[in-house]
């Protein structure tokens, strides 16, 4: 049976997995849970083992949660796991860094754009951003992708999503990181990624962000 990816009508914590599945040509059903139906679904342990989303129904019918575990499972299906221990360690490091950067998801997709919490989270995130980007650029070095391989790994898609969201708020965020900018454009130009980006709900369209959020604004 095809995979079933359950999430709210947002990019956020499910988007890196969507990128991996689309890049790998892995069939899946993207199950969008309406905000109004989320409280009821949250109590369904069969779909939400920890009362949170995303969750993924795997090929054998078992459901898993935790966005990082879901991403790495999808990456194994798509053969996006680095082959060397050192490359894998660096890829996992980058993916862990993206978890620290996760506040960009609610900043863009969830918080009311005019709220105090938006401003507070926005300022804290962008104050910390240079630290994260500097480390990522150093790890990338002269490699075309994270993981030291000749093709992308799950870390590339994890960071691509975070950077993509960041650029929606600050389009010049990568201006001082030339290697990361070149890397970002190379991921963006991959045919399967380009096709997915063109078909996903655009900014300002239902399914891209919670009403009132920056993403939901035209």
Image (tube, grey):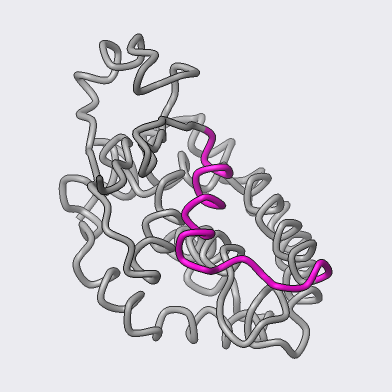
Residue 76 in the image: above or below residue 136: above
Q: Nearer the viewer, residue 208 or 62?
A: 62
- The magenta span reads 66-86
Q: Is residue 143 left or right of residue 188?
A: right
Give the quarter of the image for residue 207.
top left
Residue 163 lies in magenta, yes or no?
A: no
Q: Is residue 123 above or below residue 77?
A: above
The residue closer to the viewer here, 218 or 34, is 34
Residue 187: x and y in percent read 48, 79
Q: Quadrant of residue 23?
A: bottom left
Residue 56, percent across and down?
Answer: 39, 38
Above or below for 84 versus 20: below
Residue drawn at x 36%, y 44% is: 59
- In the picture, the quarter occupied by the C terminus is bottom left
**Residue drawn at the location 68% of the way across and 58% of the way down:** 129
Q: Quadrant of the N terminus?
A: top left
Residue at 60%, 75% in the rendered image: 174
Which of the 4 quarters of the picture holds residue 39?
top left
Residue 48 as seen in the image, left or right of residue 206: right
Q: Residue at x 47, y 71 (%)?
A: 171
Image position, residue 44 (x, y; %) = 33, 12
Q: Is 193 in front, or is 12?
A: 193
């Amino acid at each position: 049976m095809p995979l079933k990816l359950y999430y709210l009508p947002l990019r956020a914590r499910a988007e890196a997995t969507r990128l991996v599945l689309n890049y790998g040509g892995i069939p899946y059903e993207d199950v969008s849970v309406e905000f109004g139906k989320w409280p009821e679904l949250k109590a369904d342990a069969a779909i939400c083992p920890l009362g949170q989303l995303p969750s993924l129904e795997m090929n054998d019918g078992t459901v898993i949660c935790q966005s990082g575990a879901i991403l790495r499972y999808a990456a194994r299906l798509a053969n996006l796991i680095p082959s060397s221990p050192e490359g894998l360690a660096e890829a996992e490091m980058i993916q862990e860094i993206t978890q620290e950067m996760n506040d960009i998801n609610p900043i863009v997709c969830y918080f009311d754009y005019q709220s105090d919490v938006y401003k507070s989270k926005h300022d804290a995130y962008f104050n910390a951003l240079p630290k994260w980007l500097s480390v990522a650029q150093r790890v990338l070095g002269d490699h075309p992708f994270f993981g030291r391989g000749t093709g992308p790994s799950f870390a590339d898609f994890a960071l691509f999503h975070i950077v993509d969201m960041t650029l929606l708020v600050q389009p010049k965020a990568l201006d001082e990181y030339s290697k990361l900018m070149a890397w970002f454009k190379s991921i963006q130009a991959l045919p399967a990624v380009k096709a997915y980006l063109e078909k996903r709900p655009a900014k300002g369209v239902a399914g891209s962000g919670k009403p009132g959020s920056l993403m939901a604004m035209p």
